[in-house]
Amino acid sequence: MSEFMQQLAALRDDNNVAALCEAIPYARLMGVEVSTGDDGELLFQLPFYPRNVGNTVLPALHGGLIGGFLENAALLHLIWHRESLEAPKIVDFSLDYLRSGRPQTLFARCEITKQGKRVAHVLIEAWQEDRRKPVAVARAHFLLTQ
Amino acid sequence: MTATPANAQVLETMSALFVSLPHCATLGFQYLGTEGRKPTLKVEWREDLVGNPASGTIHGGVITSLVDTTSAVSVTACLPDFETIATLDLRIDYLKAATPGKAIYCRAECYRLASQIAFTRAVCYHDDPADPIAHGVATFMRESSRASMLKEGT
């Protein structure tokens, strides 16, 4: 087990989800924040930063950034909910863009649809003001064994 | 015969615009040029783009942005005139881990430009497109907005 995963495991044991996210350099660059919701599930937030814009006229968040935010959310969600300390490896990631991401906070929540011995399937949903109007939905497969 | 861009001015303007967008500038995307209608972009390895600090591997999200941007440029290589496009969906297959410290290149092509939708495919690699790190397919909506992406309103 890597030092990084040991560090993550320690943070998980402390229930320190914010520090878990901070440990990932690109999550820090995007500006991702994470907290535990009332129901105990992880809620990911990306406050608006001008550096994340992908269309300066509308303006709108960059689609690739939305993808990175959701992929990162799925990975952290899976690390958070697994007993094993091996780092899950992403196999594939599929993303549907439903609305443009406006210059305001983007939220995301994940659901582990299936966790098998070797592969996990995670659904991710992103929204802004109204959860019933998703900005994007995504799914990812992760390999759980080395 | 090697295909040439449908409208060289559209490709030149839009490729410059796409890599200059704040998010792409933050990641350090560079446009290297277009062979036929297949553009290539590059991103240098950087510590703040890492997804796994233990291995130093670049975050998959950077590859997603690179595939999205290069694929969008490949669509503009096929457009007869200026129009706005927006990603409709995107799928990335991570074929193998990227090597820490090495730049990642992405080459994309728009293999079908229909009246409302553009279909693209892309590969990311370090040295050889035949030895890819990731493969991406995407679809784009054409004429996605009445507001031009160009501030001048071309």
Image (cartoon, rainbow, N blue to C red):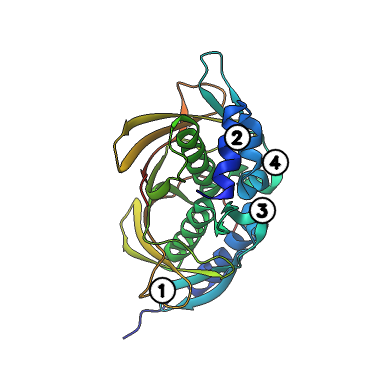
Q: Residue at x 55, y 75 (%)?
A: B32
Residue for badge 3: B22
**Disc 3 residue type?**
Pro
Which quarter of the figure has residue A129?
top right
Crowding near the residue tagged with mark 4, few <14, some 14–19, many ≥20 C-alpha atoms within 10 Å: some
Q: Are callouts 4 and 3 both on one chain? A: no
Across and down, in percent, residue A98 comes to 43, 36
Q: Is residue A6 left or right of residue B111?
A: right
Q: Residue furthest top?
A: A38
Which quarter of the figure has residue A78?
top left
Across and down, in percent, residue B128 comes to 42, 78
Q: Secondary structure at mark 4?
A: loop
Q: Chain of mark 4?
A: A
**Disc 4 residue type?**
Tyr
Residue for badge 1: B37
In contact (CB < 8 Å): disc 3 and disc 1:
no
Q: Earlier in the sequence, mark 2 or mark 4?
A: 2
**Disc 1 residue type?**
Arg
How far is mark 2 from mark 1, CA to CA? 50 Å
